[in-house]
Amino acid sequence: MAETVWSTDTGEAVYRSRDPVRNLRLRVHLQRITSSNFLHYQPATQSGKDLIDLGTFQPHPTASGHRPDEDEEEEVVIGWQEKLFSQFEVDLYQNEAACQSPLDYQYRQEILKLENSGGRKNQRIFTYTDSDRYTNLEEHCQKMTTAASEVPSFLVERMANVRRRRQDKRGMEGGILKSRIVTWEPSEEFVRNNHVINTPLQTMYIMADLGPYGKLGYKTYEHVLCTLKVDSNGVITVKPDFTGLRGPYRIETDGEKQELWKYTIHNVSSLAQPEEEERERRVFKDLYGRHKEYLSSLVGTDFEMTAPGALRLFVNGEVVSAQGYEYDNLYVHFFVELPTSNWSSPALQQLSGVTQTCATKSLGMDKVAYFSYPFTFEALFLHEDESADALPEWPVLYCKVLSLDFWQRYRVEGYGAVVLPATPGSHTLRVSTWRPVDVGPVAELRRFFIGGSLELEDLSYVRIPGTFKGERLSRFGLRTETTGSVTFRLHCLQQSRAFMESSSLRKRMRSVLDRLEGFSQQSSIHNVLEAFHRARRRMQEARESLPQDLVSPSGTLVS
């Protein structure tokens, strides 16, 4: 005989179903493996016989009238919240004095009807539904860990009386947001209403009475075969999981006569007919269609569009972190500079911000301050210059990193700037920074002891200031020191009619957008070409200023 392969995984499994839970059907099969049947000798009825007849070996009948071999195996198909009475409940509710609630009287009437119709069909397998007393006690006595000698904590004792089920509505105190966020003296009703998971949950237990023959109906022999929990979202929790292709589960009883039982749990819910599936599909299609119409009504038909020839830029950004700086307790001051030509922003739009002060933590060789500071802004680009050689400029993000110590002394840690990405999507930018330094040790001593340092009057001086009108910007004589870096995460969105129009305007605007997306590369090439032209112009001017006898007809100098 092949050895039985047991299923040792008794953890819970979670399923989700859109079908009504009332259609759930489970087939539970219970069988005894080690039998405690004892054959009892019956004396021979005929005198003079010295041999014992094998027919005289008969097992004793049980108290319920069933033979022991009939109780070796049992199989029952159970529906959701279907009540199967145990022998203990049958004996209990036959006594009218034991009935205390309307549910007890209802069970008494059902048991009397079963007795009149020939008795209950199940013997060892029974159920406890969501309305039974056992469900409440099981939730109350539920353990938090697998330890045998678990001591309930203060939170477990306080939450023991809070049921997770049937909490469809919360109290008015916990359901409405008020200006008073903290309640210093909460009432018992407030605590009860605000310390509960507001998810309606129904529970059902499939049980087995594993008592010896003739001792059915004792609470000590009751064992849980399966626990079913269903919430309002269609989530079904089964513990243990359906048997499926795995081996059966096992139960070993305690006591003088230890016995071994095995059982299996199978999902035997009937499949939906093709007509029902088609009808359900139509219902869901209609439901989703109405939901889509509802969402469309919330958005409305007056979707704001940009003007022809305009590009709207949305940026949802985040100051992620700063690292590599000398002092602790950092904060970042940043702002966005829009080019003066063709760019604008809404009147109430803020283009600057300051993060919170953040202490650094060691990460490898660097000290990192994580800000996670969000910001957002909107800008509008209006294309007016139609010339092909016009190179549009793009907004620039400037940042200034400062530190603040315990004595409220602040120091400039670095300046940096980066051009915003010209392509839509998510971008992570790391901006390297520098700070100006003075000649000699006095400035550094002042920076260390009393705070303060050299600062830029105009933060846009990090790049080319917007007020600069000359041909070349010289920073000769400015001493700087490389410091750390700031990390930005930007999510850029672009909106324009050119993305959806198919007219000549789209072609014209697409050329502008192409130049916008590649303006950084084009501007670098443009700068190289301009520098080359300026060098040629200067050489031409120098050549013209020389005497004619030093210049050959080809334009080269005569040695």
Image (cartoon, grey):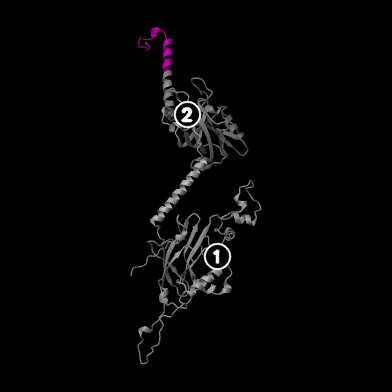
CA gap, disc 2 and disc 1: 70 Å
Q: Which residues are magenta?
A: 534-557
Is 326 rendered above or below residue 183? above
Image quadrant in which you'd find residue 104: bottom right
Looking at the image, the residue that sits furthest to the left is: 1
The C terminus sits in image quarter: top left
Residue 320, image x and y in percent?
51, 39
The reply to whether the magenta stretch includes residue 542 is: yes
Residue identified by numbered label 1: 137
Residue identified by numbered label 2: 308
Is 437 rendered above or below residue 218? above
Q: Nearer the viewer, mark 2 or mark 1?
A: 2
Q: Amino acid at mark 2?
A: Pro
Residue 548, image x and y in percent?
40, 7
Q: Which mark is residue 230?
A: none
The reply to whether the magenta stretch includes residue 404 is: no
Is 546 rendered above or below residue 61? above
Q: Amino acid at mark 1?
A: Leu
The foreground one among 424 and 199 is 199
Residue 481, image x and y in percent?
51, 31
How many numbered badges does the structure rendering display?
2
- The crowding category of the residue bearing disc 1, from other C-alpha atoms within 10 Å (few below 14, some 14 to 19, many at least 20), is few
Is 165 rendered above or below residue 216? above
Helix, strand or loop at label 2? It is: loop
The foreground one among 490 and 445 is 490
Determine if residue 94 is in view: yes
Labels 2 and 1 touching (C-beta < 8 A): no
What residue sits 57% from the left and 74% below the top? 96
Q: Is residue 149 left or right of residue 283?
A: right
Q: Earlier in the sequence, mark 2 or mark 1?
A: 1
Looking at the image, the residue that sits furthest to the bottom is: 48
